[in-house]
Image (spheres, rainbow, N blue to C red):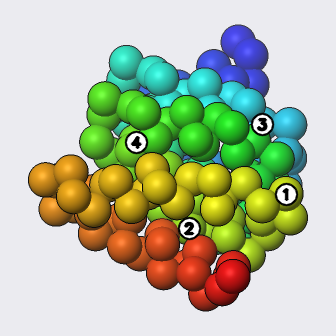
Amino acid sequence: MTQEEKIHAALASGKMDAEKLGAKVGRDARLLESIFRGTSSKLPRVKFGCSKALVLLSVKHPNLIYGEIDKVIALLGSDNQILKWNAIAILGNLATVDQRRRLPGLLERLFGFLSGGELITANNAISALSKIGRALPG
């Protein structure tokens, strides 16, 4: 069984949660790809555990997640609302480390979530936009 399979199995069985997973990835960044792959799992505990771990990592280790910003941006287009909400939150958390100035190019898309008719999505966008505005005032 691969390390990825072990992690996903532990999430699926409830033996591991997002906090433990985030700490594990914080110690071994090579596991990050497995976490991103886990967001496409058919098992809800795996999918959402991986997604929540990414949010936690974006707070504690934003540079680690920033290296994979394209994967986070891809999650914005997810049909799954929770994955979309978490991607929005992650982008807000990455504002402090946006050296390549990727986030200003996403502002229109994030502003679009404000009038999309989905209150939770709008709330997440407001939170992310406020973080981006504080970190990148220009």
Which mark is first along the chain, 3 or 4? 3
**Dot 1 corresponds to which residue?**
100
Which mark is first along the chain, 4 or 2? 4
What residue do we see at 48% from left, 81% from top?
130
**Foreground tag (2 vs 1):** 1
**Disc 1 on helix, strand or loop?**
loop
**Dot 4 corresponds to which residue?**
83
Residue nearest the viewer, comparing 103 with 86: 103
What residue do we see at 70% from left, 12% from top?
1
C-alpha distance separating marks 2 and 1: 15 Å
Indicate the position of residue 55 as horizontal and vertical percent values.
55, 58
Residue 96's quadrant in the figure?
Answer: bottom right
**Dot 2 corresponds to which residue?**
92
What residue do we see at 28% from left, 42% from top?
81
Residue 31 numbered tag: 3
**Foreground tag (2 vs 4):** 2
C-alpha distance separating marks 2 and 4: 14 Å
